């Protein structure tokens, strides 16, 4: 335990950690050590009379929660850290809702619908209501429902909201309020919640059950929230419910990095925090430990152009560093070549690894050119984007089976797999089951179990097919009780016929699908093995599904590959790289053409650019192209207005990397003298930016090599071991006997782990 950890902090950080009298707002500039402040503050609270379970720490990614927990464990010991309530908003509220489900009319086994499930249900309702799907686009309807929930507006509240109705009428969708009502009822009927419900129902639970709220208020004596600038109205309101009485709340964030308004984040939550909590003490962390002085000054000169902000003076005491290079390219293809040449040059001159480089762009579509340029050069790269592992069709099919087995009332899972693989149960039959379920206000599974009771008299062939499906699922339901996730999971994959379906031929598509399913099996094996090693008994299929359903964007990549990273700026938030290229710095691309005339939207785009620049530690480069192939035609572009927002003292309007001296004056001229050269495109043409999801790479599980009792006995402190997952480590201590024998092992890269020896997957190497 490091008793002097407070001394490691700078003055601003120390003040923020030690102040625990009332509400506090920590404005943490980019690279200013906010994780350290949060970590040490929790450690300090634990040392000053707070029990771990009295502290609630809310984050936005599992990865952030995991890293903080590990740091705190190093400070106060694993035992104490384990009992902290620390995790994402969704995972913590899911935990509360599981415990309190009966209060709000759910069972504790309720299902979580992901975005695709909820979209599918919306689509079904649109169809049942006889509405035109071309007008009532499921995605648009879903977005409106999600937005209502994030603002804590119930179906009844939505129906009576004049503004919402007028907005729906203007979009030629007056029936959204009726769809929302049905959608709400159907989710309840299926004993299911979508992601937004995890917030909404937590709010309802606390609002309608004051005795439950009081219980959690008394339990959570101190509340900490990370990345407060990214909270939506619902998240902000629940924190207020819990903190209202004791006011022991500390929120950390940076208004200059609020970039998720399209997901419902509301910058006002942080801007007006001191109005909501009048006795707030504000701390500003202004020293940037990440970037050179030049990069910090350039970012400051950019962001000061925003009106709506909490003013701060970020500074760096690192070396001055090089000016930010600005490259102009004739075309997007040349921009790709310039960037790749610059990477090759820096690798030669400064000996950087490939993983020291990141290319950041505004939209996913821009990656192609850079991919081609790198492929030509044989440079390794990885893209954060495309479909995440759990969003692939074959994986979703398997997961739907898992979900139905865990919760037979799950409507979306039922519809997805009742005829997959094809077993001759057509849409008409499914339609009849849905109608009977809706009329009788029960689940589809309940109708399937007793069709005659609900007036369904199918012919003999259909009846036996339905019975076959019911028995198949029924058999799995029995197996769930006695088998772990891996055992029942592999059984379902085999017996459902999915694996036979994907192995019909050896086409590349089918091989890839088969590999994905094998990877899922590896993932389940790993999930069970790892939890068993840690002595965590929760290895059922329900536990596995809970884990899978809460995977967030940044959680999945282990990041140790030696590759150049390509990603959208949105995905890069929270990360850092030694060298960063921000590409496509043109009007209508960055800032996005979606901005239109909205000053608020333009300020968010400027904050997004600020996030991009502040990812860089040593070098930052900005590039733009005079022509770009977009929407099937060549377009002429003008440099982004944001380039003019940066003080020219911090820029190097470059002649190198493909920009000859004859062109250099044009760079300066185009940046600083010309107005927009291209007319605004119509809004409809613009493709909305998307935040990519990342592919989870699950390491294949090696066949269990659990040591025999003899080898368990042989484990001694001081030995070096090689672990299948955590790599090299040293045994620090061994305690307990026989099956309960545990070893604390210090791993070179994974830190300290406590493992149950009978399940541990390692070999002694010295």
Image: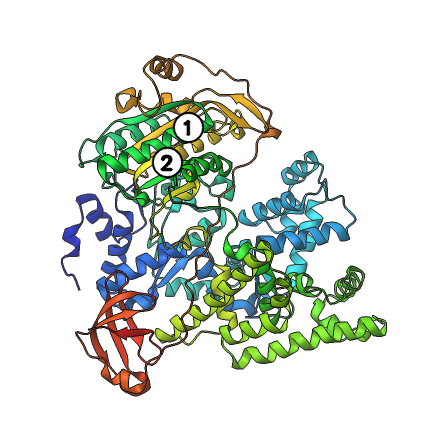
Please determine whether, in this image, residue 501 is positioned above or below residue 369: below
Would you call the spot at circle 1 few (<14 residues within 10 Å), some (14-19), or many (20 or more)? Answer: many
Q: Position of residue 207 (x, y in %)?
A: 52, 58
| Residue at figure coordinates x 51%, y 27% from the top left | 598
Residue 113 appears anywhere in the view: no
Q: Nearer the viewer, residue 735 or 230?
A: 735
Is disc 2 placed on a helix, strand or loop? helix
Which of the two marks, 2 or 1, is nearer to us in this view? 1
In the image, 113 versus 155, the foreground residue is 113
Which secondary structure, mark 1?
helix
Query: Can the viewer see residue 662 in this picture?
Result: yes
Q: Nearer the viewer, residue 304 or 406?
A: 406
Colour pattern of the rendering: rainbow
**Pick the front one: 685 or 364:** 364
Return the disc, 2 or 1, that comes first in the chain's sequence: 1
Q: From the viewer's perspective, is 261 left or right of 300?
A: right
Residue under numbered circle 2: 612
Q: Position of residue 751 (x, y in %)?
A: 25, 63
- Vertical relation: 214 (above or below) 313: below
Residue under label 1: 335
The residues bearing labels 2 and 1 have C-alpha atoms spaced at a distance of 18 Å
Q: Position of residue 345 (x, y in %)?
A: 28, 33
Where, by quadrant of the figure, is residue 748 drawn? bottom left
The quadrant of the rendering that contains the N terminus is bottom left
């Amino acid at each position: 335990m490091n008793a002097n950890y407070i001394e490691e902090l700078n003055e601003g950080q120390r003040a923020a950690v030690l102040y625990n009298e009332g509400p506090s707002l920590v404005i943490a500039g980019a690279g200013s050590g906010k994780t350290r402040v949060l970590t040490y503050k929790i450690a300090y609270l634990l040392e000053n009379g707070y029990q771990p379970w009295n502290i609630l720490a809310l984050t936005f990614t599992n990865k952030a929660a995991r890293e903080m927990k590990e740091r705190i464990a190093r400070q106060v010991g694993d035992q104490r850290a384990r009992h902290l309530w620390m995790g994402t908003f969704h995972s913590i509220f899911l935990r509360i809702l599981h415990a309190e489900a009966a209060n709000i009319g759910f069972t504790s086994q309720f299902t979580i619908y992901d975005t695709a499930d909820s979209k599918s249900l919306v689509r079904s309702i649109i169809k049942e209501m006889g509405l035109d799907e071309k007008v009532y686009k499921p995605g648009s309807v879903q977005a409106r429902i999600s937005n209502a929930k994030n603002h804590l507006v119930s179906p009844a509240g939505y129906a009576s909201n004049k503004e919402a109705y007028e907005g729906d009428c203007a979009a030629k969708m007056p029936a959204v309020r009726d769809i929302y009502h049905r959608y709400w009822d159907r989710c309840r009927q299926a004993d299911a919640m979508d992601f937004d419900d995890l917030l909404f129902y937590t709010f309802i639970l606390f609002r309608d059950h004051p005795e439950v709220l009081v219980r959690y208020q008394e339990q959570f004596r101190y509340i900490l929230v990370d990345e407060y600038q990214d909270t939506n109205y619902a998240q902000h309101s629940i924190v207020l419910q819990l903190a209202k009485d004791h006011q022991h709340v500390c929120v950390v964030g940076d208004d200059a990095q609020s970039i998720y308004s399209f997901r419902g984040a509301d910058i006002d939550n942080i801007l007006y925090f001191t109005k909501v909590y009048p006795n707030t003490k504000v701390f500003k962390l202004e020293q940037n430990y990440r970037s050179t002085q030049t990069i910090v000054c350039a970012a400051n000169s950019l962001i000061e152009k925003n009106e709506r902000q909490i003013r701060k003076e970020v500074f760096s005491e690192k070396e001055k560093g090089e000016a930010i290079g600005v490259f102009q390219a004739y075309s997007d293809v040349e921009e790709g070549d310039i960037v790749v040449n610059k990477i090759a040059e820096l690798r030669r001159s400064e000996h950087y690894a490939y993983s020291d480089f990141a290319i950041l762009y505004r939209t996913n579509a821009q990656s192609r050119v850079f991919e081609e340029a790198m492929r030509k050069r044989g440079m390794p790269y990885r893209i954060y984007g495309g479909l995440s592992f759990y969003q692939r069709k074959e994986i979703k099919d398997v997961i739907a089976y898992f979900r139905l087995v865990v919760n037979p009332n799950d409507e979306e899972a039922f519809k997805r797999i009742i005829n997959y693989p094809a077993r001759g149960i057509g849409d008409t039959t499914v339609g009849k089951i849905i109608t009977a379920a809706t009329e009788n206000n029960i689940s589809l599974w309940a109708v399937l179990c007793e069709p005659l009771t609900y007036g369904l008299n199918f012919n003999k062939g259909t009846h036996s097919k339905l019975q076959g499906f019911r028995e198949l699922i029924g058999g799995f339901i029995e197996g769930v009780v006695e088998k772990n996730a891996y055992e029942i999971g592999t059984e379902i994959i085999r017996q459902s016929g999915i694996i036979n379906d994907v192995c019909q031929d050896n086409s590349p598509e089918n091989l890839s699908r088969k590999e994905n399913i094998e990877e899922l099996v590896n993932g389940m094996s790993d999930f069970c093995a790892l939890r068993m090693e840690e002595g965590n008994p929760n290895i059922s299929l329900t536990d596995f599904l809970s884990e899978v359903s809460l995977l967030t964007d940044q959680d999945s990549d282990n990041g140790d590959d030696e590759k150049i990273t390509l990603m959208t700026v949105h995905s890069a938030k929270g990360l850092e790289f030694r060298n960063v290229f921000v590409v496509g710095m043109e009007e209508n691309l960055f800032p996005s053409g979606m901005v239109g005339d909205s000053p608020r939207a333009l300020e968010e785009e400027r904050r997004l650019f600020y996030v991009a620049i502040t990812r860089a530690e040593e070098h930052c480069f900005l590039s733009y192209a005079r022509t770009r192939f977009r929407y099937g035609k060549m377009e002429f572009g003008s440099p982004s207005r944001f380039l003019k927002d940066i003080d020219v003292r911090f820029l190097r309007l470059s002649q190198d990397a493909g920009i000859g001296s004859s062109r250099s004056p044009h760079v300066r001229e185009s940046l600083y003298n010309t107005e927009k050269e291209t007319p605004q495109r119509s809004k409809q043409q613009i493709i909305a930016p998307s935040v990519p999801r990342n592919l989870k790479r699950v390491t294949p599980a090696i066949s269990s090599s659990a040591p025999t009792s003899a080898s368990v006995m042989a484990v001694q402190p001081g030995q070096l071991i090689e672990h299948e997952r955590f790599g090299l480590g040293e045994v620090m201590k061994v305690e307990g006997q026989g099956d309960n024998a545990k070893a604390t092992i210090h791993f070179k890269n994974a830190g300290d782990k406590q493992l149950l020896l009978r399940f541990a997957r390692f070999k002694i190497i010295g």
